[in-house]
Image: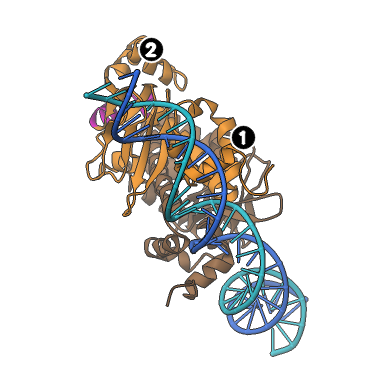
Chain colours: A orange, B brown, C blue, D cyan
DNA sequence: GGAAAAAGTTGAAGTAGATTAGGAAATATG
DNA sequence: CATATTTCCTAATCTACTTCAACTTTTTCC
């Protein structure tokens, strides 16, 4: 399926557009193919784009002084990904965004996004809606992380996002869920002390 | 100072308005005074408003099966607070929002917010900007929670938000930072094992 | 398709932070 | 302004999860 068509269809889940508006919107996106392990955002460089995933899987992550990686966000098809702090404020990134498998993306340049929003209030509405939904979903994630045990967080994730499991390696998922790979492995194999 | 004036001044940090637009915007807000311990959002009731804090302090929190409270968000003057999941999707809330001290708020009704956004694209822009900023700040918070120790999270908070410390009781702050009150107390009094 | 690298598993030992319990300050309220 | 309530502190014990180390399985790629 034509990637440009996908983004047009995606935005119309949230707002209704004329054919002309939809094609104007789509025209601002550029199709990008990335390979596994390729970086599309890197620390110290400003994230000039946000990415809509047509197909594939990506993650954002930070690396601490001792080289340990922590996954901050995951994205498969129909999800967006970038370093939001960097993108929104156009400041240097602190995260990597990396392809976990070969992927097809639609990149939207920061400047082009501003043009879109200026050109038509409907696009402003669209970006407001996706920001709000992101906000609500992050508030749920913060709540989970603060209130649930490692095992509960894993169970919740598998039930809520089963499609992700086929695409995300365990090392990436473990740190996303706030635990080590070893501990996630034990949870998956029912080896946590006190469990049958 | 006139509360309605404050919100007009606040919005103009982000977008420029004519005097008429500013007063139209302000007119949709209602001044509310709440006392300490008063709830303005409660689980199972849909959050019909979002609240801009003129003066005072509030928190949102969830309560688990065993009655334990976890602070999800904090707000003092110039901050917004509500249960975003509930407000944005107009679904039943899962959180309480409670005044931590007597406070003056400006409440914005969900319907009135929709009217504002329809009436003038500038208001749509404003709500998009505050949602995006909230998104970026929550991404920073998730990163902190996943990568830093309890002591580092506390230190970061005191440096980044010193104004909050005067208003937020420790039991509310501790769970916001993802630790128990007892452990926060030890950190504050430098009683964490291995520290001078 | 075989060697090397990457990802996942297992178990033992260690630790950051929780729990419990009791007392001391601070704050609210009659 | 006294006492009841709430908040905060301290210390001992406990535990969910980490760390470390060695191994197995899967994936990559020449």
Crowd around label 2: few <14 · some 14–19 · many ≥20 (10 Å)? few
Chain to which mark 1 belongs: B
Residue displayed at 45% across by 58% down? B77
| Residue A133 in the image, given as x and y percentages of width and height | 48, 34
| Residue B127 in the image, given as x and y percentages of width and height | 41, 38
Crowd around label 1: few <14 · some 14–19 · many ≥20 (10 Å)? some
User: Which stretch did the figure color magenta?
Assistant: A111-124
Residue displayed at 60% across by 47% down? A148
Q: Is residue A178 above or below residue B121?
A: below
* Mark 1 → mark 2, Cα distance in angstroms: 30 Å
Residue displayed at 27% across by 17% down? A27
**Disc 1 vs disc 2: which is toward the camera?**
1
Q: Which mark is residue A18?
A: 2
Q: Please name the predominant secondary structure of the magenta segment in the image.
A: helix
Q: Nearer the viewer, residue D18 or A126?
A: D18
Q: Nearer the viewer, residue B110 or B155?
A: B155
Chain to which mark 2 belongs: A
Question: Which image quadrant for residue A169?
Answer: top left
Q: Is residue B164 visible?
A: yes
Q: Nearer the viewer, residue A58 or A143?
A: A58
| Residue B132 in the image, given as x and y percentages of width and height | 39, 40
Residue B171 within the magenta-colored segment of the rendering: no
Q: Which residue is mark 1?
A: B91
Q: Is residue D27 above or below residue C10?
A: above
Residue displayed at 67% across by 50% down? B64
| Residue A8 in the image, given as x and y percentages of width and height | 38, 16
């Amino acid at each position: 399926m034509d990637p440009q068509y996908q983004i047009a269809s995606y935005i119309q889940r949230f707002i209704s557009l004329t054919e002309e508006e939809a094609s104007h919107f789509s025209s601002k996106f550029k199709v990008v193919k990335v390979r596994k392990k390729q970086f599309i955002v890197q620390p110290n460089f400003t994230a000039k784009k946000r990415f809509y995933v047509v197909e594939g899987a990506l993650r954002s992550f930070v690396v601490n002084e001792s080289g340990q990686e922590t996954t901050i966000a995951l994205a498969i098809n129909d999800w967006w990904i970038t370093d939001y702090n960097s993108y929104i404020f156009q400041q240097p990134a602190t995260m990597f965004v990396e392809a976990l498998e070969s992927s097809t993306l639609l990149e939207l340049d920061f400047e082009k996004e501003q043009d879109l929003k200026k050109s038509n209030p409907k696009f402003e509405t669209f970006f407001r809606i996706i920001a709000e939904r992101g906000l609500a979903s992050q508030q749920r994630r913060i709540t989970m992380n603060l209130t649930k045990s490692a095992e509960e967080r894993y169970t919740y994730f598998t039930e809520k996002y089963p499609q992700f499991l086929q695409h995300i390696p365990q090392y990436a998922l473990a740190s996303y869920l706030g635990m080590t790979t070893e501990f996630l492995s034990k949870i998956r194999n029912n080896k946590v002390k006190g469990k049958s």
